[in-house]
């Protein structure tokens, strides 16, 4: 044994050194401070050995999944010079591996992501198992590769490819990695170490010029000044166009690659570090890292739920149509046989058409083949009766949003299923406790609220009623994970969590419009803020009648702040049958484009109707529009959290991002509040106290503001 640590070991056999990453008592390898320190010690031991070559492997199912984000998050708070010095120390370790006086090969199994891939780049060659994946996910965390990734990657695979790999943050399969030269060979997983050893022995024998390969990685980029300028400026413009300037990390990475293009490795790494420290300090990085941690928390809760969940081997959907068909497709596409019941043949046909449409699109995109589509569709069994329901493990009710009808259908279904079958309602607003009153086994009942369109929206709200058992909740949480969704568990209340927090945002919009603001201008401001669409456009997409229904539910549930005393622009639109995209007009006019998608345009009639309910001619600036829209949302999120509707701020923010499209780079309502500072939030709210209770911070918010507290420690 040449070196033995808790994170890695180095053994030497026939003058070939094998450096094996194997973090003791941990399920995965990741780069934390201890691992980097041990790698440095191993490099020293290797430099003093008589080894002729180095083979780098992993004993885990994945090579290295990346850096320990908790440790790095703490580092980001350090002063710039101290932070940069720590990064430089880590880079020196990677350089020490790269500079060893022997050829080196990495055998990549499972996944090599972020710092794990940068470790692979420090060796001369890479061999990849055919099921492995590699990539740089850092830009999804608001940062970019900081262990030499922006320096070694363009020198290895060219600037264009490097920019694409680093900017988009996606994982690549082995065939894609081989095609651009990121790896030198792809072999069967069970032949990985043998294949890597074979390549290493050939390099030792002089069949491969490993020194030339290393010199290329350590020298300037092979582009002249004109070529470099064109490559980097064009790419920067493209990335800016896609990110709208809201995600600085990929742009900064491109700028740093450009600055370092004609420098040697060591000088280029200094340029990389300067930019890395800069982006690590941005609010976008803080928000996106917190988003990652939120996701980890929800996955952890999902694993815990799996311990008491019942397996769903057979599902059923009540109510076909578009929503029922979407749920049936999602279930069948994940391998779960699904009954789809309705009382009308035409509804069944619509549901089957909806499922078939999604399967066909998956074939079109190359995700599945025709055989997989046929298999998927065969898992959906349409029915007009309850004849086969006794063997169903879970039933998702998706009938019309009417409490009387839902109660009737649920009670009828309960008599047709076994005593252990879980019933879940896809209601978006009706009280779960109210619906449960119609059932004999309310402990087996809860809410499972999918967002539309089902196949695209990642969130599922799992709504716990007062009688819902832990087993029922855990089973539906596990089922949501099985369907590829992210479930958050919330307690029953009007609007549940996501819609409850969304509608104060809509009320802020309606008050702005009533004061005289231009709805199209509000849309532009909120889209620049980061929303995928502004509130007027979103109302058109959701449907005015749907919004009005939820608004009525919330007005009844929270009359002190959500009951409106005057007619709104939404009411006027509904009165005039302008329900949005589905009727061809709302705040905007809609016509089909060449691909059959609705394309919006301005409509003078909409302005006439809106003018009829405007009481002023205010022209608020961007800051006022943002504050009047966002402050009610933050306050309602705080109320819901304080009332125990959700367990953690993490789940609240994830719900808003995944269910509403809240700008991810702002992290959610709570993370955005932390970035503003709760004192600033309360001060802004007080400026608009005359607008009503929606702008009244909770006592806990004021207490937190006074104490300088935040919702998240990493803020």
Image: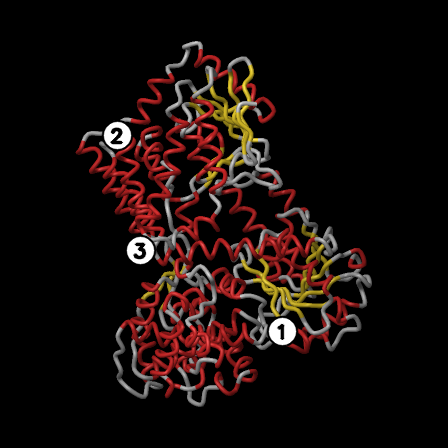
Q: Please give the name of the residue rendered at 49% of the width and 24% of the height, measured from the top-left corner.
A: 127
Tell me, yes or no, whether the two marked residues, 2 and 1, touch with CB atoms within 8 Å: no
Q: Residue tagged by mark 1? A: 492
Tell me, yes or no, whether the two marked residues, 1 and 3, touch with CB atoms within 8 Å: no
Q: Secondary structure at mark 3?
A: loop
Task: Find residue 298 and report its horizontal and vertical position in percent.
Answer: 57, 57
The one of 268 and 244 positioned closer to us in this rendering: 268
Q: Please give the name of the residue rendered at 30% of the width and 82% of the height, measured from the top-left corner.
A: 516
State the CA–CA distance, disc 2 to disc 1. Answer: 61 Å
Circle 3 packing at 10 Å, graded few (<14), some (14-19), many (20+), is few
Task: Find residue 711 and report its horizontal and vertical position in percent.
Answer: 47, 67
Report if residue 578 is visible in the image.
no
The one of 639 and 273 positioned closer to us in this rendering: 273
In the rendered view of the protein, which quadrant contains the N terminus? top right
Task: Find residue 61 and report its horizontal and vertical position in percent.
Answer: 59, 35
Q: Is residue 600 above or below residue 188?
A: below
| Residue farthest to the bottom, as pictured | 565
Circle 1 packing at 10 Å, graded few (<14), some (14-19), many (20+), is many
The answer to which of marks 1 and 3 sits earlier in the sequence is 3
The answer to which of marks 3 and 2 sits earlier in the sequence is 3
Q: Residue tagged by mark 3? A: 244
The one of 52 and 696 positioned closer to us in this rendering: 52
């Amino acid at each position: 044994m040449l070196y033995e640590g808790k994170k890695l070991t180095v053994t030497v056999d026939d003058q070939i050194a094998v450096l094996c990453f194997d973090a003791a008592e941990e399920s995965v390898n990741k780069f934390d401070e201890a691992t980097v320190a041990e790698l440095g010690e191993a490099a020293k031991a290797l430099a003093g050995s008589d080894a002729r070559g180095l083979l780098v492997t992993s004993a885990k199912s994945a090579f290295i999944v990346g850096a320990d984000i908790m440790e790095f998050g703490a580092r980001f708070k350090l002063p710039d010079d101290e932070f940069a010095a720590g990064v430089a120390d880590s880079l020196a370790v990677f350089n020490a591996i790269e500079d060893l006086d022997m050829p080196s090969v990495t055998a990549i199994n499972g996944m090599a992501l972020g710092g794990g891939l940068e470790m692979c780049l420090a060796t001369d060659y890479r061999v990849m198992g055919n099921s492995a994946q590699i990539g740089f996910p850092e830009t999804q965390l608001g940062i970019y590769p900081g262990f030499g990734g922006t320096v070694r990657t363009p020198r290895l695979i060219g600037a264009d490819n490097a920019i694409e790999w680093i900017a988009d943050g996606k994982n690549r399969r082995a065939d894609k990695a081989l095609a651009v030269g990121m790896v030198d060979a792809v072999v069967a997983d069970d032949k990985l170490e043998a294949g890597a050893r074979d390549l290493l022995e050939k390099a030792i024998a002089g069949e491969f010029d490993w020194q030339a390969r290393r010199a290329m990685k350590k020298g300037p980029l092979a582009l002249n000044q004109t070529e470099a300028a064109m490559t980097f400026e064009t790419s920067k413009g493209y990335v800016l166009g896609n990110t709208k300037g809201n995600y600085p990390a990929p742009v900064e990475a491109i700028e740093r690659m450009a600055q370092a293009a004609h420098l040697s490795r060591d000088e280029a790494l200094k340029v990389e570090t300067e930019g890395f420290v800069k982006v690590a300090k941005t609010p976008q990085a803080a928000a996106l890292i917190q988003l990652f941690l939120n996701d980890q928390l929800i996955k952890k809760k999902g694993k815990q739920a799996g311990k008491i969940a019942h397996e769903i081997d057979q599902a059923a959907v009540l109510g076909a149509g578009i929503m029922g068909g979407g749920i049936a497709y999602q279930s069948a596409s994940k391998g779960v046989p699904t009954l789809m019941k309705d009382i009308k043949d035409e509804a069944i046909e619509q549901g089957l058409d909806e499922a078939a449409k999604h399967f066909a699109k998956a074939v079109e995109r190359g995700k599945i083949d025709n055989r997989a589509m046929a298999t998927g569709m065969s898992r959906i069994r349409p029915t007009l009766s309850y004849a086969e329901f006794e063997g169903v493990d879970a039933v998702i009710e998706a009938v019309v949003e009417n409490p009387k009808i839902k109660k009737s259908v649920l009670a009828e279904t309960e008599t047709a299923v076994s005593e252990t079958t879980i019933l879940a309602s896809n209601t978006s607003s009706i009280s779960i406790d109210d619906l449960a009153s119609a059932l004999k086994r309310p402990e087996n009942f809860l809410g499972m609220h999918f967002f539309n369109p089902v196949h695209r929206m990642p969130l599922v709200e799992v709504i716990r009623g007062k009688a819902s058992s832990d087993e029922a909740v855990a089973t539906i949480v596990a089922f949501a994970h099985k369907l590829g969704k992210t479930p958050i568990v919330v307690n029953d209340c009007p609007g549940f969590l996501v819609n409850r927090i969304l509608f104060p945002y809509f009320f802020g919009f309606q008050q702005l419009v009533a004061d005289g603001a231009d709805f199209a201008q509000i849309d532009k401001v909120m889209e620049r803020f980061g929303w995928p669409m502004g509130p007027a456009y979103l109302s058109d997409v959701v449907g005015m009648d749907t919004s009005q229904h939820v608004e009525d539910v919330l007005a009844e549930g929270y009359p002190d702040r959500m009951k409106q005393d005057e007619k709104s622009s939404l009411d006027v639109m509904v009165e005039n049958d302008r329900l949005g995209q589905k009727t061809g007009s709302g705040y905007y006019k809609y016509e089909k484009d060449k691909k059959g998608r609705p394309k919006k345009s301005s409509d003078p009639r909409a302005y006439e109707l809106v003018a009829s309910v405007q009481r002023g001619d205010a022209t608020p600036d961007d800051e006022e529009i943002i504050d009047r829209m966002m402050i009610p949302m933050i306050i309602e999120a705080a109320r819901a959290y304080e009332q125990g509707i959700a367990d953690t701020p993490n789940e609240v923010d994830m719900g808003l991002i995944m269910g509403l499209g809240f700008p991810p780079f702002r992290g959610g309502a709570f993370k955005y509040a932390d970035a503003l500072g709760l004192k600033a939030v309360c001060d802004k709210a007080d400026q608009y106290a005359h607008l009503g209770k929606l702008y009244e911070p909770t006592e806990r918010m004021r207490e937190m503001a006074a104490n300088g507290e935040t919702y998240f420690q990493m803020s």
